[in-house]
Amino acid sequence: MQTIVLGSSSITRAELLTRFGVPFIQRDAGFDEESLRINDPAHFVYHATKGKMQSYLETYDLEMPVLCADTVVTANGEILRKAKDKEDAKRILKAQSGNTVSILTCMIYKSKTCELIDLSSTDYLFLPFDEQLLDAYLQSDEWRGKAGACMVEGFCKSYIKEVRGLESTAMGLSVEKLLPFLT
């Protein structure tokens, strides 16, 4: 399998590629997705990923295949971005409690001979969050820097009632869909 470039600084995406045995080097694409003013979750995640790929290609050439991705967490049609502060984190987590949460990941894989664009979704039905455990989680600051203020493999894990879709999609990269394109 050929080495690819992961155009992202995401530790979780790097861990996923390692887990699936994909050889890669990591370079940040340098795109500011916060500059996008798009409210529709699918459009937002697509344009953020497209922006990352364009930014990467403006800086580097295509000497190796490149993979860029972006992920958004949504509930009730609202994009739940990274929380600005503890109050915002609480609001975001309350929107997820006892609700269906969709995690959308878009990835673009580009080589000299092919381009794959994939937009996938994984849905989680969460039980209501325990108020005391939620407060303890908020005090821990583990929510900082995380889309939706939480990771499904972290605080939210014990509240998962049902999952529809790939866990890798929820973690930020639909690796199972990428593998057939890697030669």
Image: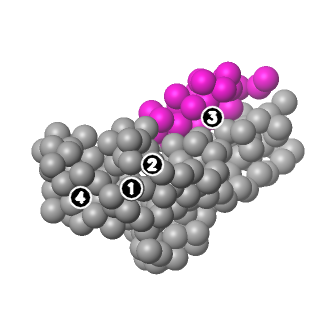
Label ID, residue 89? 4
Q: Which of disc 3 and disc 4 is earlier in sequence?
A: 3
- Is mark 4 in CB contact (under 8 Å) with mark 3? no
Q: Which of disc 3 and disc 2 is earlier in sequence?
A: 3
Part of the protein shown in magenta: 1-27
Tell me the CA gap for discs 1 and 2. Answer: 6 Å
Q: How many residues crowd around disc 2 within 10 Å: few (fewer than 14), some, or many (20 or more)?
A: some
The quarter of the image holding the C terminus is top right
Tell me the CA gap for discs 1 and 3. Answer: 38 Å
Residue beneath the point at 38% across and 41% down = 158
Q: Which residue is mark 3?
A: 5
Label ID, residue 160? 2
Q: Which residue is mark 1?
A: 127
Can residue 82 be seen by looking at this rendering? no
State yes or no: residue 13 in magenta: yes
Three-letter code, disc 1: Leu
Residue beneath the point at 52% across and 61% down = 102
x and y percentages locating residue 18 in the rendered image: 59, 24
Which is more foreground, mark 1 or mark 4?
1
Which is more foreground, mark 2 or mark 3?
2
Tell me the CA gap for discs 4 and 2. Answer: 19 Å
Q: Quadrant of residue 168?
A: top right
x and y percentages locating residue 54 in the rendered image: 60, 57
Q: Which of disc 4 and disc 1 is earlier in sequence?
A: 4
| Element carrying mark 4 | helix
Tell me the CA gap for discs 4 and 3. Answer: 32 Å
Q: How many residues crowd around disc 1 within 10 Å: few (fewer than 14), some, or many (20 or more)?
A: some
State yes or no: residue 20 in magenta: yes
Q: Which of disc 3 and disc 1 is earlier in sequence?
A: 3
